Image (cartoon, rainbow, N blue to C red):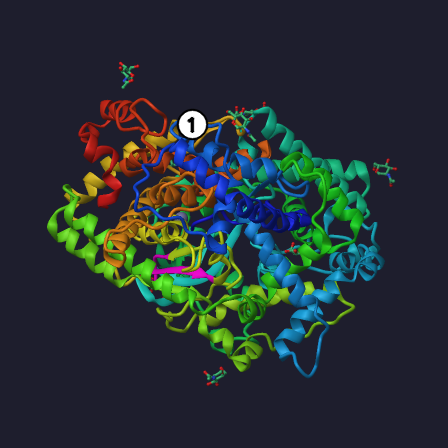
Amino acid sequence: MEGEAAGSSMPANKKAASKPLRIALGVFVTSTVALGTALFLVSQGHIKLQPKQQYCLTSECIEAAAAIKSKLNTSVDPCDNFFRFACEGWIQNNPIPEDSSSYGIYPWLRHNVDLKLKALLEKPLSKRRDSEAVQKAKTLYNSCMNENKIEKADAKPLLSMLKHSPFRWPVLESNIGPEGLWSERKFSMVQTLAALRSQYSSSVFIRMYVSSDDKMSNEHIIKLDQASLSLSAQEDYLKNTTEAKAYRDALFQFMVDIAVLLGANASRAELDMKSVLKLEVKIAEIMIPPENRTSESMYNKMNISELTTMIPQFDWLAYIKKVIDTKLYPDLKDIDDSENIIVRVPQYFKDLFRILEGERKKTIANYLVWRMVYSRIFNLSRRFQYRWLDFSRVIQGTSSLQPQWDKCVNFVENALPYVTGRMFVDLHFQEDKREMMAELTEGIRWAFMDMLENENTWMDSETKSKAVEKAKAVLAKVGYPEFIMNDTYIAEGIKTLKFSETDYFGNVLQTRKHAAQSDFYWLRKEVPKTEWFTSPTTVNAFYSSSTNQIRFPAGELQKPFFWGTEYPRSLSYGAIGVIVGHEFTHGFDNNGRKYDKNGNLDPWWSLDSEEKFKEKTKCMINQYNNYYWKKAGLNVKGKRTLAENIADNGGLREAFRAYRKWIKEKRQGEEEALLPGIDFTPNQLFFLSYAHVRCNSFRPEAAREQIYTGAHSPPQFRVIGAMSNFEEFRKAFTCTENTTMNRDSMDSLTCALRQTLCRNKKMGMNFLKKV
Ligand SMILES: *[C@@H]1O[C@H](CO)[C@@H](O)[C@H](O)[C@H]1NC(C)=O
Ligand SMILES: *[C@@H]1O[C@H](CO)[C@@H](O)[C@H](O)[C@H]1NC(C)=O
Ligand SMILES: *[C@@H]1O[C@H](CO)[C@@H](O)[C@H](O)[C@H]1NC(C)=O
Ligand SMILES: *[C@@H]1O[C@H](CO)[C@@H](O)[C@H](O)[C@H]1NC(C)=O
Ligand SMILES: *[C@@H]1O[C@H](CO)[C@@H](O)[C@H](O)[C@H]1NC(C)=O
Ligand SMILES: *[C@@H]1O[C@H](CO)[C@@H](O)[C@H](O)[C@H]1NC(C)=O
Ligand SMILES: *[C@@H]1O[C@H](CO)[C@@H](O)[C@H](O)[C@H]1NC(C)=O
Ligand SMILES: *[C@@H]1O[C@H](CO)[C@@H](O)[C@H](O)[C@H]1NC(C)=O
Ligand SMILES: [Zn+2]
């Protein structure tokens, strides 16, 4: 993945101001071009002005210059902290919205996509013009915007769920009527767990899903994994720091208050929720941390009968059969003990059922139903959401709720990704973007193979030729899956969904059910290796190891990532080009490298090359471990973020190399024209464009969460880490030795002391270009 998954950062609607600002800056730059140019000639700054060098004075170049200039803080020395130099202006002008815990270029783009979807969804529904699917999307959106109805319904829709098995909530006793009274005798954990998963797509204790079999990537298989907790980080349950304790206290109070809002007796709620939190802490203790979740350790294929022998306390077959709705998938009625499954975390499951065996049924029921209630709170009236906001103040630092329209846009987008995707690309995706994406992909592919062949000194030739084969097989998917253009196909995919303008809660439940069952469609079907199922409006990019695909949905292909051919290529190579390189490199990172060109988990490295690779990654783990993030009060976790750091370092080098090749071949070596009013060479623009992708700021709560749960390093270290390792960067900005942005001397020496293999400066710090 390229950007951090959106998670808790929810942009507000304030950012509409950015566009007029940009236009204003454009005007400003236009009127001062002549002056700027003159100033240039005298000041000369970093750049060497050759008489031949031209300025590009088109409106696009002026716009780009203004966009770049407005993001900088030129008082910072680029060799000291390139992130601050590149981003501090933008960060200053774009404070974190009250309803978000972090804000940056990614969330800003996300917000722009939301605004476009809002405009599309708010166009009046037309039975004549709108396809069936678009009508459903608009109806769903309208029901969500119908706040009067939602207020009137208040807690009623949820309470009616809590009155029936399997979701009676012990803490409520008979306070919502005698039919709501929970009974230990009638409680079945299997039943409740299965209902959560099969009706609402909620995974508690167990995450069950269908995806491709890692070692037979043409086939689908059921996988069982650990699930999430109420708080996002495992550490929040395990540490005794002030923050962790405050989070647990806030969660406890939140659970109590919600139970009381739904009718519980307060003192009873406190007692019950104390036990619930204790149980959740025990679960957190046995969860397998990300560092231990390697592809090999999670590949435990067995049949259900073997799993039942291993963990006899739970009726696995009954659970799996209850989760799958065989009315939708009659073929799956035949699932029995012989069904193969992949158990990703056997030790966790053993520990889990040991814990649950010793737990009171009432506590288990209280916990399971709490999780159901928690995932529905957003779908209730305001008073519930305001109670959530008090909780969010503590764990995310936010101080207002997201505007209803934004929530509703995200809801419809998640529920109907292909419908909203189609609406979006019809209006906002230009097909000619494919051409430059093809140019970039081929440039990256070439650069990767060129570095492998000409600079990698440690990989043996057999492993190299396998790596080349895999690089050649990487398949790029751009924009949107073709099938979204087929109205019949889209309508068929959502034919069971029948929305009502006046029943928002009922609509939500339908979408949950639909999401819950959708992956079972694939269970007996072959994996379509050249297809992709990514929502087109996603502002992110991906690598898929099972299909060896790199994926760039339409949402990602926008300024300031993707710049059209009218803009200097340096900007696109530095931004979307590095993103292409980043995804490409994931195929060869510490996890991706284990999969072959056909997407199978099947070792293709010689033992010797593998050993050297591992030695070399230790340097990088070390480098990032040493980054201290004051906002979080924590150091970066070098091991947890290794795959992303490899992708960043590799992607930057590949894209730069591809850019220089483009200049050499497409412009016969002649540099691109300069931008007016800003003092940068094309190579410098390349690096600025990379850094600008990453501009982002965080509240302390979000910073902490980023370190504990993020797969990526924090943005400033993604910039500083990859750039300070790269000799072309320090050349471009003439960063002398002993500067932070030039790690060639001091830090590689430190590294060398620990890792003999890294002693060779060139090999050590630059190893990534050779992977
Ligand atoms: C820009 O950098 C200077 C020097 O470090 C600093 O004093 C100033 O506050 C920064 N400006 C912004 C907007 O962050
Ligand atoms: C945190 O405090 C609790 C209760 O005092 C104690 O049982 C636990 O061991 C402590 N955990 C850590 C990681 O120190
Ligand atoms: C809550 O329960 C306690 C203890 O059982 C009882 O004393 C109290 O009256 C109850 N409160 C309400 C509002 O029912
Ligand atoms: C994670 O792996 C390390 C090293 O292999 C091991 O010592 C540790 O016990 C593992 N932790 C868990 C929770 O599995
Ligand atoms: C499950 O797998 C084991 C080991 O391969 C085999 O002996 C057993 O017969 C299988 N059970 C069923 C029900 O297929
Ligand atoms: C309804 O609840 C679901 C699940 O929590 C959430 O994803 C969705 O955003 C909610 N809808 C709204 C409009 O908040
Ligand atoms: C569109 O989808 C339908 C239903 O899946 C299919 O029968 C039809 O062949 C598709 N049309 C095109 C042009 O692919
Ligand atoms: C870099 O720092 C070291 C140690 O502080 C010092 O010995 C060396 O002279 C410095 N080099 C440069 C070029 O400033
Ligand atoms: Zn990534």
Q: Which residues are magenta?
A: 544-553
The answer to whether 312 is drawn above or below residue 101 in the figure is below
Q: In the shown orientation, is residue 724 left or right of residue 488? A: left
Q: Quadrant of residue 590?
A: top left
Magenta highlight on residue 742: no
**In the image, residue 374 lies at what x, y percent?**
67, 49
Query: Along the line of sight, which residue is nearer the eye, 378 or 104?
Result: 104
Ligand 1 image position (quadrant): top right
Residue most extreme to the left: 461
Q: Quadrant of residue 744?
A: top left
Q: Residue at x 78, y 68 (%)?
A: 502
The answer to whether 118 is drawn above or below residue 740 in the figure is below
Q: Residue at x 19, y 35 (%)?
A: 763
| Residue type, label 1 | Asp
Q: Which residue is mark 1?
A: 77
Query: Along the line of sight, which residue is nearer the eye, 331 or 73?
Result: 73
Magenta highlight on residue 549: yes
